[in-house]
Image (cartoon, grey):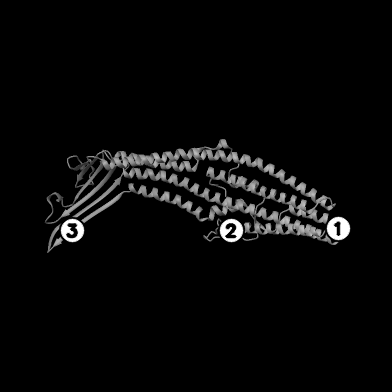
Amino acid sequence: MMKKLLVLFMILGCFSMAAQEKDGLTLHFREYLGYVKKYHPIAKQAELVIAVGEANLMKARGGFDPKVEVDYNRKKFKGTEYYDQLNATFKIPTWYGVELKGNFEQTDGDFLNPERTLPEDGLYSAGVSFSLGQGFLANDRMATLRKAKFFREQTLADRDLLVNSILYEASVAYFNWLQAYNDREIFRNFLENASIRFEGVKERALSGDIAAIDTVEAKIAYQNRALGLTQAEVALRNTALELSNFLWMPNDVPVELEDGIIPDTSLQNEIDIALEILGKPLDSFTIENHPKIKSLASKIDQLVIDRRLKSNNLLPTIDLEYNFLTETPELINSLGSENYKSGLNVRLPLFLRKERGELKLAKFKLRDAEYEYDNATVSITNKILAIYNELDSYDEQNKLVFDIVNNYGVLLSGEERKFSFGESSLFLINSRENTLIDARLKQNELQNKFFTAKAKLFQSLAINPENL
């Protein structure tokens, strides 16, 4: 009768080992990443990068905003009005260093400079100023706006890189938490088996069926399982704390993971969908569409513009201005070539050492960025190739370790059956069980590496998931 009870206990133990506890709320991987992307401070910081790019573009466009300038001066001393001068100008900057402007001047006073003497009702002018040398095909206004447009494209790519990076780190934390949970469940189930076996051995020892020393063997096995469970519990709590680093409330308050929440143990089919790497074979990858490459390409475009501007600074400064003058602006035909004001300004440094030095620095910066681009292209491509190879290898390893675990389980079950008939020993059972535990832990570790490799592929492709 005692032998039958022991066999029954062992069978129940095997069933309990094969089942996992379902008494907690499950935090699904996709749901978890959705929280991270929406509420994590770094994810929010990534959105600020785009806002910076838009603000920078608005600032650059401000260089082409129309301007109104008013200059008014008056001097009166001891009842004498020395001068009363008003100068109002409206300017419209345009693309190729050309500036359109309209002007109104009015002066009065006893001590005016003769050249400032104007008609009583003032003088109107309409004209244009432009640069023929330096500043015609390239100037600061044009360069700033062009670079701002490329910078906006760069911020979009940088945003994707930041979001991808935090989601990768969050994924690894989830996988580590899952591994710790699975390890804990293994030790919990085997502790239950050891407890059942220990009670059965004590009953058999009391009935004189086996030697009393066998109870010591069973108790040591039970204590080892309890020690392993304690260590697994600590690892689970620590990985849960690491996971909590990525959980935040909408009002920027960090959240700590509660004890009753467990990971999704059937994660295999959800990872590819959550990370949006499902159906992405190697031949579908295009390096030019990678956010890192896009960011570097935008950086190079900005440096090319900067180099052109520095090259243009080697030209002489030739500023021309021509204004039509009239006292009756309401009459269009009053703007004639007989009344005008013009000017010419020419400047040319003799040695151009400052300009030539700036051009060399611009060329060096551009070449440095091109080297970085070339290196990143090769590095990212090879890394992605390596990860695809790694995934294929892990897929094969997982199949092998699954068979190994099953075979070790068969050996343990056979040893337990032989023990129930008095044909084996607790030492052999414990040895088989230790080997099975190691294999199960190795299986969890390999699964973690497989999942982490998928996360590395997600990181290498720099995907910013749209459906989280």
The label shown at residue 74 is: 3
* Residue 191 place in picture, x, y as percent: 73, 57
Q: Which is nearer the N-term, disc 1 or disc 3?
A: 3
User: Outermost residue toward the right?
Assistant: 1
Q: Which is nearer the N-term, disc 2 or disc 1?
A: 1
* Marks 1 and 3, how far apart at CA: 122 Å
The label shown at residue 209 is: 1
Q: Circle 3: is it few (<14), some (14-19), or many (20+) Cα within 10 Å?
A: few
- Callout 2–callout 1 Cβ contact below 8 Å: no
Foreground label between 1 and 3 = 1
Q: Is residue 433 left or right of residue 121?
A: right
The label shown at residue 8 is: none
Q: Is residue 135 visible to us here? A: no
Name the amino acid type tagged 3.
Arg
- Residue 371, quarter of the rendered image: top left
Name the amino acid type tagged 2.
Leu
Residue appearing at x 42%, y 51% in the figure = 52
Q: Circle 2: is it few (<14), some (14-19), or many (20+) Cα within 10 Å?
A: some
Residue appearing at x 53%, y 46% in the figure = 464
Q: Is residue 237 visible to us here? A: yes
Residue appearing at x 80%, y 48% in the figure = 414
Q: Is 202 above or below relative to 349?
A: below
* Residue 245 place in picture, x, y as percent: 55, 57
Seen from the viewer's position, the closer of residues 28 and 131 is 28
User: Outermost residue toward the bottom?
Assistant: 78
Residue picked out by circle 2: 241
User: Outermost residue toward the top?
Assistant: 283
Q: Secondary structure at mark 2?
A: helix
* Residue 319 place in picture, x, y as percent: 24, 41
Name the amino acid type tagged 1.
Asp
Q: Is residue 452 left or right of residue 159?
A: right
Q: Is residue 136 left or right of residue 10?
A: left
